[in-house]
Image (cartoon, grey):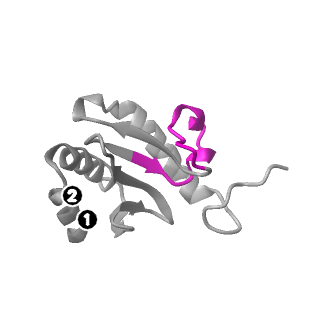
Amino acid sequence: MDIVLNYIESRPEQQAQLMQYAFDYFTSFPNIFPKLRYGIPFYYQKSWVAYTSPQKHGGIEVVFLRGIELSMATELLAKNRVMVRGIEYRNLEEIDHNYLEMVWLEALDLDLNVKFVAPYQRKKAK
């Protein structure tokens, strides 16, 4: 956890504030473990649930690994990605906590309850 906090503190102030908000919120849930992977903070439960990625404009993107499977997938940013979907924030005032919570809780539920053949593969249509 210290390595993730050190990373967050090393970011420019605006990104650090946003990443700290996400860190504090995500880790307030039981059984959520932050790890630094690919040079950015990932949040695990049973598997990868989400990560925070710094953006060039000074904000961050909160990305959900199985975002395509979320009920609000069409509302989330795809950025030409097959599986993951995200939400971009430029400052703390932009964060709609209720919306973030709704997406986060569904992502946690999906991580715990959906069985899949191999990690990070899209569910096949029947």
* Outermost residue to the front: 56
Residue 96 location, x and y as percent?
Answer: 34, 30
Residue drawn at x 50%, y 38% is 77
The amino acid type found where label 2 is placed reads Ile
Residue occupying image coordinates x 39% and y 68%:
38
How far apart are labels 2 and 1 at the CA level? 6 Å
Q: Residue furthest right?
A: 126
Does any portion of residue 42 appear in the rendered image?
yes
Q: Which structural element holds mark 2?
A: helix
Residue 57: mark in rendering? none
Mark 1, Cα crowd under 10 Å, few <14 / some 14-19 / many 20+, is many
Where does the N terminus fall, quadrant-wise?
bottom left
In the rendered structure, which segment of residues is drawn in magenta?
62-81
The picture quadrant where one finds residue 116 is bottom right
Residue appearing at x 42%, y 39% in the figure: 87
Q: Which residue is mark 1?
A: 4
The reply to whether residue 32 is visible in this rendering is no
Residue 98 pos. (x, y %): 38, 31
Seen from the viewer's position, the closer of residues 32 and 83 is 83
Tag 1 secondary structure: helix
Give the side of residue 66 with respect to residue 13, left or right.
right
Q: Give the amino acid at mark 1.
A: Val
Indicate the position of residue 90 as horizontal and vertical percent values: 28, 35
How many numbered circles does the render carry? 2
Neighbor class of circle 2 (other Cα within 10 Å; few <14, some 14-19, many 20+) is: many
Q: Dot 2 corresponds to which residue?
A: 8
* Residue 68 painted magenta: yes
Residue 82 is inside the magenta segment: no
The answer to whether mark 2 and mark 1 are in CB contact below 8 A is yes
